[in-house]
Amino acid sequence: IEIELRKLNANYKMVDQETMLDFTAAELSKGKAVGWFQGRMEFGPRALGNRSILASPTQMGILDAINHQVKFREHWRPFSPSILDTVAKEMLPDNFQDEFMCLSSPVSKKWQEKYPVIVYRDGTTRAQVVKKQTSPDFHRLLSAFYERTGHGLLINATLSRPGEALVCTPEDAVNMFFGTDLNYLIMDNVLVTKRAERDRW
């Protein structure tokens, strides 16, 4: 990753994992949209926490911001959430505890009102339930966000632009990052920014 970033003359900083998790959770809580590039790429139609665009489900205007400035799609389209398994037990019926974001699940009125940006017009959502055993790093990020905000879920969209495949390589990720309004790109333990930032650590 670092070799590729040097080739592309990108602004980046190496950060330890705990600091990166805390920083990412903090920026998400402020309404920032983050590109999340971790480990190996997923195989299949959904981003499951390795090649994702992440955002808070509670920030006003985040739906429009991602639809218009990042994904370039219709303003009314909701996003799918990734939910901590402990929180998903309260939100989703038992037979919809899906780890792969392939099932449309009914959502109770309580949760629809709390998180409208993740709910379709028919009152359903297509969620990923994140378990520590199968997605330890993504689970840690969701847990850090939960501890900071009290919300155990994040908007999770594919790290891709319209008409393009899911980001695969570091070069793909950086090119997408600079072609959208994403605020940060996190690549394993590397923070990529669009301009040099003051030293926070």
Image: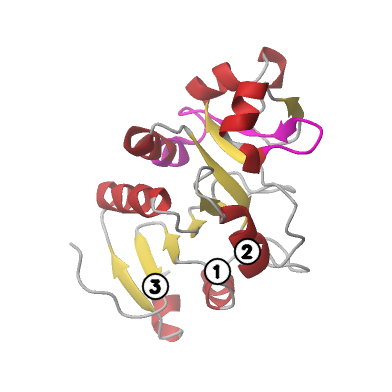
Which one is earlier in the sequence, the residue at label 3 or at label 2?
2
Residue at label 2?
A: 167
Q: Which residues are magenta?
A: 119-141
- Residue 110's spot in the image, x, y percent? 61, 22
Identified at 50% across, 49% down, the residue is 59
Identified at 60% across, 44% down, the residue is 48
**Label 2 amino acid?**
Val
**Label 1 amino acid?**
Ala
Residue at label 3?
A: 193
Residue toward you, 157 or 50:
157
Pair 3/2: label in front:
3
Above or below, comparing residue 3 to residue 96 in the picture: below
Residue toward you, 172 or 76:
76
- SS under mark 2: loop
Which one is earlier in the sequence, the residue at label 1 or at label 2?
2
Left or right placement of residue 145 versus residue 34 in this view = left
| Proximity of marks 1 and 3: CB atoms separated by less than 8 Å | no
| Proximity of marks 1 and 2: CB atoms separated by less than 8 Å | yes
Residue at label 1?
A: 173
Identified at 54% across, 32% down, the residue is 83
**Label 3 amino acid?**
Thr
- SS under mark 3: strand
Q: Residue furthest top?
A: 94
Residue 42 belongs to the span the image colors magenta? no
- SS under mark 1: helix
